[in-house]
Amino acid sequence: MRIPCPHCGARDVQEFTYLGDAKPRRPEGLDATEAAMLEYVYVRDNPRGPNDELWYHAAGCRAWLMVRRHTLTHVIESAVPTKSAKAGVAA
Amino acid sequence: MRYSIFSLISQALKGHRGWQPAWRDAAPKPGYDVLVIGGGGHGLATAYYLASRHGISNVAVLEKGYIGSGNVGRNTTIIRSNYLLPGNTPFYELSMKLWEGLEQELNYNAMVSQRGVLNLFHSDVQRDAFARRANAMRLAGVDAAFIDREQVRSMLPFLDYETSRFPIQGGLLQGRGGTVRHDAVAWGYARAADSRGVDIVQNCEVTGIDIVDGRATGVQTTRGPIKAKKIALVVAGNSSRLAAMAGMRLPIESHVLQAFVSEGLKPLLDCVVTFGAGHLYISQSDKGGLVFGGDIDGYNSYAQRGNLPVIEDVMEAAMALWPGLGRVRLLRHWGGVMDMSMDGSPIIDHAPIEGLYLNAGWCYGGFKATPASGFCFAYLVAKDEPHPLAAAYRLDRFATGRLIDEKGVGAQPNLH
């Protein structure tokens, strides 16, 4: 599998680190309900089909990418840099 | 037909022309007391224990492909009960005890071989961790032997002891662990369930779950609608998809795990051995092939095939442990789809919908659990209360914080 990095071109999947589903967003502050935190930390859609996910190009440009990839065929539709990863998903 | 030495001799004299199919290829009836969705090892075991332990035989097992086509035929056939945490150890030990009596109970040769499972350690820290696990096992009544480097060398003289970056310092040996022929587990449970009246319906994919007033009443399938009083989901790998049909979302991601078998070799490895400095386990099948596997590929996938980097990683670990493998050729490799749960442990529980039961999240350790999973799930479905040894596998543990995180890596399924 190769990921078309917007900065480096198509690169081997070995250069990347996978974080996971890009959808969950950390609820705001201490006011977050337990249900919202449960959703954020544990519950996933886990689709068989196109999936938006976060990959880190560790051995390349070191950018976080939002990759839209099909989970059955592994075909990658798009890969774009994301700024939301740090604030929204990365621990 | 009961299998025995006498049936074998009698068939041999008749040229083996009298053998009958081991189970009926049933057509679905309009309704059942219990529908088991998923004809893998766990589903067939569930149906068998429902019929044999709880007298519920108006049961159908629905399988989208054919029996044994999924993960029960894609694993590396290892059985063990060398777990650390209280929620796990007694459950997997129940499974081991059921394995020990399985062939007599099912009247089917599953080639249960208690050849020993040896986990190697390569550092002082790992020695401490393994000593703790060995102690936890012995406290729970599981056999565990802690052996040193020289004892390992006497068992497996061909491993790399001298030149490696990760010298072997010793191992944790569970002598009762071993391997089982995985297809025969599916076939044995299918035959035993069928003989007690269970319908095994193949090529029957569930396309929808009927829910009326908050209660599951039946399913839509590619072979027509089927009504049921209780519906048991046992579809690890695809649990999220089935759950979505009932409007549920699960703490599970699907990932692909690859496994490998080499060309046939003369007998040289008489136990299961795992490499502690990487993720690798090897055993030798009775046909002579070395069966081995390692890590999951690490990203969400429903493809029953993996990518080359993990193959390379597994081969490197194999070479590091056992340099003599260098000229052995790989015969086949394949992939299976795993339900990777958020704490690395399974779920055996009621679903939040009445009449619906959930058995999921086996990560890549489901095969060894097959008998206990079916046993405890059948108990839950029949009695509407959890079996005491599986009571920790609750769906709500992610909300209550009672996680069973054997590896301690948190909610990152690709690391479990």
Image (cartoon, coloured by chain):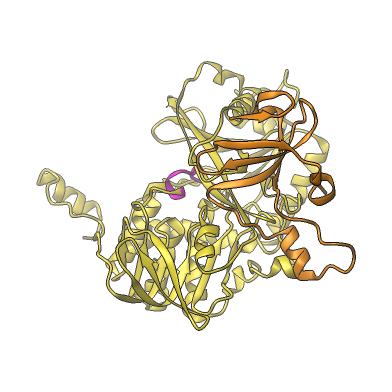
Chain colours: A orange, B yellow
**Front-most of B221 and A78?**
A78
User: Up-down: is B173 above or below B139?
Assistant: above
Q: Is residue B359 visible?
A: yes
> Where's residue B233, x and y in %?
48, 65
Q: Quadrant of the N terminus of chain B?
A: bottom left
> Where's residue B282, x and y in %?
55, 34
> Where's residue B258, x and y in %?
53, 37
User: Up-down: is B25 above or below B270?
Assistant: below
> Residue B135 appears in which quarter of the rendering?
bottom right
User: Up-down: is B82 above or below B327?
Assistant: below
Residue B74 is a magenta residue: yes
User: Up-down: is A42 above or below B32?
Assistant: above
**Front-most of B29 and B42?**
B29
**Front-most of A32 and B162?**
A32
Q: Residue at x 68, y 47 (%)?
A: B416
Q: Residue furthest left?
A: B14
Give, as a single range, the part of the protein colored magenta. Answer: B71-78
> Residue B200 appears in which quarter of the rendering?
bottom left
Residue B312 relative to residue B115: left or right: right
Number of labels in the image equals 0
> Where's residue B219, x and y in %?
40, 70
Residue B216 relative to residue B159: left or right: left
Q: Is residue A13 visible?
A: no
Residue B268 is a magenta residue: no
Q: Residue furthest right?
A: A30
Q: Residue furthest top?
A: B327
